[in-house]
Amino acid sequence: MRTRSQKKTGVATAACITLLALAIAVPATAQAAPADPDPTAAATVLRPVDKPRDGKPLPETGGIPSDVRQKIQQLVEGPDGVHINDLVWDRETRTLEVHVLEGEAAEVEDDVRAAVGDSFRFVQDAYDVDRLEAEAFELAKSAVAAGVPVVSVRTTQDNSGLLVSVADPSTTADQTTTQKLASLAEDTGIPLAVETTTDEPETTSGWRWADQSPFYGGSRIYKPGAGACTSAFPVVAPVTGGYQTAMLTADHCGAIGDVWRSGQAGADNWALGTMTDGNSGGSDFKRIALANGAGIQGRVYTGAEYSSTSLPVKARSYPVTGDVICPSGAYSGLNCLAEVQSTGDVLCFVADGGLCYNNLVTVHSTSDTPLFGMGDSGGPVVAGWNGGVVGFGVITGVNTGGNNVKTCVGVQGARECSVVGYIANIKAFFDNNPTWNLLGG
C-alpha cells in the first residue's frame, strides 16, 4: 500500500474498506443468553450507564473529515464497491486515490464522483490486494517455520508483488535467506523482493485503572499473577432468547481460558471474564466472555491514563492509508496522532517466538510524541463521529528500532513507547464473526 506521510520509512499496503456499520444498541435490561458452555458467560446483564464519565467530543484529527469518511465507507459497501481494489487518502491534496484492477475504473467512476466530488484519481494495480495479503500471511508463517527471521511481509507500493523484511544487521540479506524465501513463494507466481531491517516490532502487553461493572472499553485489565493489557470494545451478537456479549482485546495478551480482572492487581476490583477465541482469521483479537454478574456498556475511555471520561460507541469503520486516528491505551491515554501508513500488513514478533499476525495497520505519529507502549495492548483505536466514536481496531505493538523509542506519555516506569506502532484492523474480527457487532452506547 501507499504511504502519504512525510516520514517515508517503508513500503506498505492497504486493504479495501467497507461500510460505516452502525453499532447495535441493546436495551439496558436485556439478558445475555449463554453462547458458550462456560457458565461464566451465562448471566451477563447489560446495565445502563450510571457513571458520570461523558467526555468532550473528539476533534477532527487532520485526516479524513468525518463526513467524508462515512461517504467513503458507504461507497465501498455499495453494489459497485467490488470494483475498488484499494483506497488511499492524500492528506496534502485532500484527494482520494481509488485503486482498481485493469478495466474496473469505468464501473465505479460515477459512484466515486457522487461520494467525493472531483477530488479523486484512479490508480491501476497489478494484483488483487486480497490475494496479495493472503499470500503474505502464508509466506510469513512458512518462513518463520523454516527459520527465516521475518519481521514483516507487505505488498509493494503499486501492488505488483510482495516485499519481505528480514531481521539482519547487515546491509544485504543473506543469500541463503533469499533463496529460502524465493522457494517458499515459488508456487504463488507473485514477484518477491527481500530487504533487511533493523526494525524491532514488539507487542505492548504490559477511572481506567479502577473500572467497574458495567465495563467500558479502554480500561486496564490484568491476569492475576501475570501481565496487564487494555480492554477494547464491548461487542454483542444475537442468540436464541437474548444476546451474547463479550469484551474484545488483543490475542497476544493471553490464552484461551485465562481469567481476567479489571483494575489494578491486588486492589478491590471486579472480575471481568474468561478469554475465548477471537476467531479473526489470523489477526490479533480475542474475546473475553463476561463473568457472572458482570455488565458492559457501549462506551470507551477517551481521556488520559487516570481519567474517567468516556464517549459512546456509534459505529465501526476501517482504516484508510493517509487517515489520522486515535489510539486509547490504559497506560498512555488517548491521542489523535496516529497517521495510517499501511493496512493489510503481516508482522512477525521475533521477541514473542516469531508470532505472526495478519490484517495489521502500521501507524506513525504525526509529531515526536509516542503513540502508545507497554500495557496498552488490546486498547481501542477510534475517531470522533456523531457525538461519540467509531472503532477502527485494537492496539497490537510498537516498533522499537532506530530512533522510534521515546519517553512515554502517561504512566512512566519500565515502559517502552514508540512513534511507530501497529494496530489490528477491526475488519478482521467482523469479517470472520459476521453475527457480531460493536455494542452501541
Image: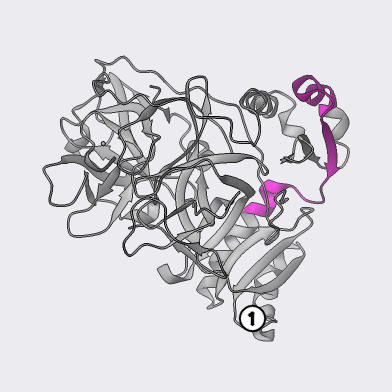
Tell me where residue 167 appears, x and y as whole percent.
57, 75
When asked about the image quadrant of residue 60, the answer is top right
What residue lies at 58% left-to-right and 36% top-to-bottom?
A: 318
What residue lies at 41% left-to-right and 68% top-to-bottom?
A: 352
- Which quarter of the rendered picture does the C terminus lie within? top left
Tell me where residue 379 appears, x and y as whole percent.
40, 44
User: In the picture provided, is 80 more to the left or to the right than 332?
Assistant: right
User: In the picture provided, is 435 more to the left or to the right than 77?
Assistant: left
Q: Secondary structure at mark 1?
A: helix
Q: Is residue 139 in view from this perspective?
A: no
Residue assigned mark 1:
177
What residue lies at 29% left-to-right and 52% top-to-bottom?
A: 256
User: In the picture provided, is 191 more to the left or to the right than 132?
Assistant: right
What residue lies at 54% left-to-right and 69% top-to-bottom?
A: 401
When asked about the image quadrant of residue 103, the answer is top right
Foreground residue, 225 or 178?
225
Disc 1 crowd rating (10 Å Cα; few below 14, some 14-19, many 20+) is some
Q: Specify the segment rendered in magenta.
A: 108-133
Tell me where residue 58 appears, x and y as whole percent.
50, 29
Q: Relative to 138, does residue 342 appear above or below in the rendering?
A: above
Q: Relative to 133, does residue 73 appear above or below in the rendering?
A: above
Q: Is residue 250 in view from this perspective?
A: yes
**Figure label count:** 1
Tell me where residue 233 appears, x and y as whole percent.
39, 35
Question: Could you tell me the amino acid type at mark 1?
Answer: Thr
Q: Relative to 85, does residue 154 appear above or below in the rendering?
A: below
When asked about the image quadrant of residue 420, the answer is bottom right
Residue 431 included in the magenta stretch of the image? no
Residue 109 included in the magenta stretch of the image? yes
